[in-house]
Image: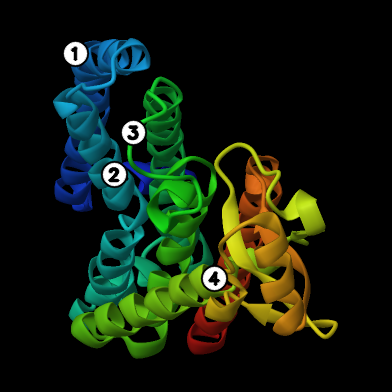
Amino acid sequence: MSTAGAVGGLPWTVLRVHRTALIVWGSFAVAVVGLLLWARGVTADAAQAEAFHCLHYDTCGVPATLEYSAILRYTATVLCYSFYAVAAWAGAALIARELESGTAWLAWTQSVSPVRWLTAKLAVPALLITLSGTVLVAAFRWSWSHRPDRVIGAWPSTAVFVARGPAMVAYALCALAVGALAGLALRRSLPALGVSFAVMLVLSQCLDRYRADLWPSITRTGAAAYDQSGPLWQLESGVFVHGKRVPDPGYGNCEGTAAEAKRCLTEHGVTGRYSVYHPTSHFWPLHLVETGIVLAVTAAATAAAFRLLRRRTA
């Protein structure tokens, strides 16, 4: 067997060895797209009709709207956290199992170099993840764009935030790279699975916690603090007491006539109100910054995996 033939057959070898995972992932993508198409064609139209009806009548029911909300919410959750499955598979099956069983070492003694072996191992699933992930994101965005205003779920929620853009694909690619690195470092399936899963859990939780800080927020004071339209991501609101911000104070909620409310606020030292938030227009800046961070981690994990492989096979 020639070197060119061996290298050229590597992608097919990867597909054949991991055909079960390919079938499972492909079935998952088809099922999600099918569900979104069905929901858009059946439930969304009924939800839109309910929304139109509610504009003209004081009482109305919204069962279709609740159903469409649930479909979008659950689908977003599955898409957002699908990278955990990728991390588990990459850590346990893609690399570590072949090192553990010795099949990788056998391939290296034939006509395939370790670097080319790892390149094929990462490139084939990365291509499939990117293509299928792009289709899934496009399908979800299409379904999300046809939602009625009453549909439950807002863009700042973690699942919807990730599922509506390339961050979903970036997380899956990062899980692939982290799983490969864990497999090379530990060379045992179960430990590599646990470590890759844990690393991706920590990464996603950290970005979820500090997501609001990835782009400068907007602060409004005085009457402008109340003048906010559209689905906002409210970060903080409160009053100024003697020139200092006091978040959400109960004593600032003065009631009564205008004169009584003003006197009450003065007695408590309240001189104004403020609101800190992200408007809807901040979705893409926040999303792209997070995507860039995840892709940077992906590149670092990939580079570390190749460097570790070279050191161990030198």
Label 3 secondary element? loop
Determine crowd level at label 1: few under 14, some 14-19, many 20+ residues with C-alpha closer than 10 A. Answer: few
Image coordinates of residue 15 in percent, x first then y, are 27, 45
- Decide if residue 76 is on the left or right side of residue 66: right
Nearer-N-terminus badge (2/4): 2
Which dot marks residue 99? none
Nearer-N-terminus badge (4/3): 3
Determine crowd level at label 4: few under 14, some 14-19, many 20+ residues with C-alpha closer than 10 A. Answer: some
Rendered position, 56 above or below 165: above
Please give the residue where the numbered disc 3 appears in the rendered image. Answer: 151
Q: CA distance from mark 2 to mark 4?
A: 20 Å
Image coordinates of residue 40 in percent, x first then y, are 28, 18
Q: CA distance from mark 1 to mark 3?
A: 15 Å
Q: Are marks 4 and 3 in contact (CB under 8 Å)?
A: no
Please give the residue where the numbered disc 4 appears in the rendered image. Answer: 207
- Decide if residue 103 is on the left or right side of residue 150: left
Kind of residue sitting beneath label 3: Val
Kind of residue sitting beneath label 2: Arg
Please give the residue where the numbered disc 1 appears in the rendered image. Answer: 42
Q: How many marks?
A: 4
Q: CA distance from mark 1 to mark 2?
A: 17 Å
* Front label number (1 vs 3): 3
Please give the residue where the numbered disc 2 appears in the rendered image. Answer: 73
Kind of residue sitting beneath label 4: Leu
Identify which residue is drawn at 73% across, 72% down. 263
